[in-house]
Amino acid sequence: MIHRRLAAAAVGALLVGVLAGCSADDSAKSALSQSAGTAASSARAAGLVLGLNEVGRVLPTVMDTGLTDAADRLATEAKSVATMTAIGGIGGSRDRILADIRSAQDQVASAQRASAAGHDSGNALDRERRALDRLAQQLDAASKRLERG
Amino acid sequence: MKGLFAVALGVLTAIGGFVDIGDLVTSSVVGSRFGLTLAWVVVVGTIGICLFAQMSGRVAAVSGRATFEIIRERLGARLAVANLSASFLINLLTLTAEIGGIALAMQLASSIEPALWFPVAAFAVWIVVWRVKFSIMENVTGLLGLALVVFAVAIFFLHPDWSALGSQLLQQPSPHTDETPASYWYYAVALFGAAMTPYEVFFFSSGAIEEKWKAKDLAQSRVNVLVGFPLGAVLSLSIAACAAIVLLPKGIAVTSLFETALPIAQAFGKIGLIVAILGFVAATFGASLEVTLSSGYTLAQFFGWPWGKFRRPASASRFHAAMILSLVVGLGILLTGVDPVQVTEISVVFSAIALPLTYLPILIIANDPKYMGDRVNGRVTNAVGLIFLAIILVASIAAIPLMIVTGAGA
């Protein structure tokens, strides 16, 4: 009788442990997916601003605000991803996402420097725009992969 | 001719004054994430605010007394305190969001970071509330707010797929997005709260006394509400539609006011952006004036202090002190470094949570012949009023669980 109770308690504890582990695993995946999604959206917004600038449709003040905003949000997501604990085998995904977010930060910073120096007319920032669009696609794909589990 | 001009001015002011930072942010967030699938909420919310404003305007015009004064007398101090607390706290949160909105709009015009604009915006609001006549203040900001019509025109210049856009109106969450049903309903509550912010009603009913309305002016007030507010809601829907056309397909979820303006840049370029920014500043500045005044109105009317812009500030010192205090608290919250857009998102959801406490007393008083004489609610108004009471209760009860489940819509 005692053995049976002990066995039931052990199975219960195991179940709780597994569920807690799964839950922590799911929660880490969900947080990483959300960060990748937010970073993708910020990179796309910065890309759209640069695209509109190429065709002369955006005010310098709006472009400046847009790039500053994208830089701030990418920095927030980079910090959040960098401090995530790599549990449940998401270490590889986390490192790739972090690298993509940091690349996007570099592209935005490069566009900001060019804009501050007045080298932003026409398609001068085309390279940054294309890179941001590509990084946004990668981040979005990573976010969706994590969501699907 | 003079009467027609007054009606036209009232309607135009109501249209331009309808949109505030809550509508600007929530509409574009919803458009960029859900397309037009939540447009029905704007329609429901607009019917609700028309009903709410029309009842409270009638109470003020017929009784000639302030709304909060009657609430305290009719419902007793305990219920009136609950009403006052909910109203005042939501006002404070909304005021914080509106001042933040002015700063975000000024950042788009100047590249100067919002933190430097917060004190300037709060000071400018105080000066206008202190010095400018009520009618001038209301009409100028309302008319300048009409610049937001640029969003309605932009829809045509963006050459959308009309059938796809139209079909979104009848859909549940868009199959093209990864949004969950909980997020969909969370933003439904947020949009409802943005459409039915209580300050609009306090401002409207106290404005009736500021402008010395009598029962004979009710027809004009009804036209202002029933024509102006729905047309104002069309501006909200246009902002959502622009985001749905440009930002949703690109996978850009709005998190900032600059993203709200991007569809206008795509449609009209720099000139369009200038008009949109003018509209943002007018909408947020006008709403800041209204919320600041509402903060003063609620406290002064409850405690029986002299109030109103028709009085010299020296004769209504506690009313003006309450407004200054509200501005200082709002400014203090913003200076802690909170994101004004997040404050806005939270303020509209809390508006929905507190709505039963602000709506029910008006519904009760609008049915009381002691105050209203033969101008009590008719059967149709009461039937619609009760349906809205049920909707408001459901939205209020669902708001916090949805906020927790979705991580505030993240």
Image (cartoon, coloured by chain):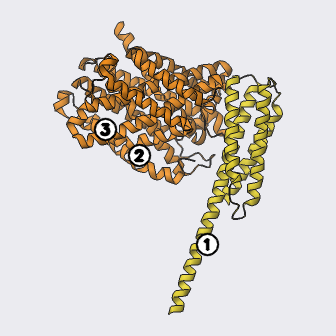
Q: Decide if residue B196 is in sight here.
A: no
Q: Is residue A114 above or below residue A84?
A: above
Residue B52 appears at what percent x and percent y? 34, 33
Disc 2: CA contacts within 10 A as few (<14), some (14-19) or many (>=20): many
**Residue at the spot of label 2:** B395
Q: Amino acid at mark 1?
A: Val
**Residue at the spot of label 1:** A18
Q: Amino acid at mark 3?
A: Gly
Mark 1–mark 3 contact, CB under 8 Å?
no
Q: Decide if residue B75 is in sight here.
A: yes
Chain of residue at mark 3: B
Mark 3–mark 2 contact, CB under 8 Å?
no
Residue B322 shown left or right of residue B65 in the figure: right
**Residue at the spot of label 3:** B385
Q: Are marks 2 and 1 on the same chain?
A: no
Q: Nearer the viewer, residue B311 or B325?
A: B325
Disc 1: CA contacts within 10 A as few (<14), some (14-19) or many (>=20): few
Mark 2–mark 1 contact, CB under 8 Å?
no
Q: Is residue B56 above or below residue B217?
A: below
Residue B217 shown left or right of residue B106 in the figure: left
- Colour of the chain lettered A: yellow
Q: Alpha carbon of mark 1 to alpha carbon of mark 3: how far?
A: 51 Å
- Colour of the chain lettered B: orange
Residue B216 appears at what percent x and percent y? 25, 17
Residue B201 appears at what percent x and percent y? 36, 30
| Image quadrant in which you'd find residue B45 | top left
Disc 3: CA contacts within 10 A as few (<14), some (14-19) or many (>=20): many
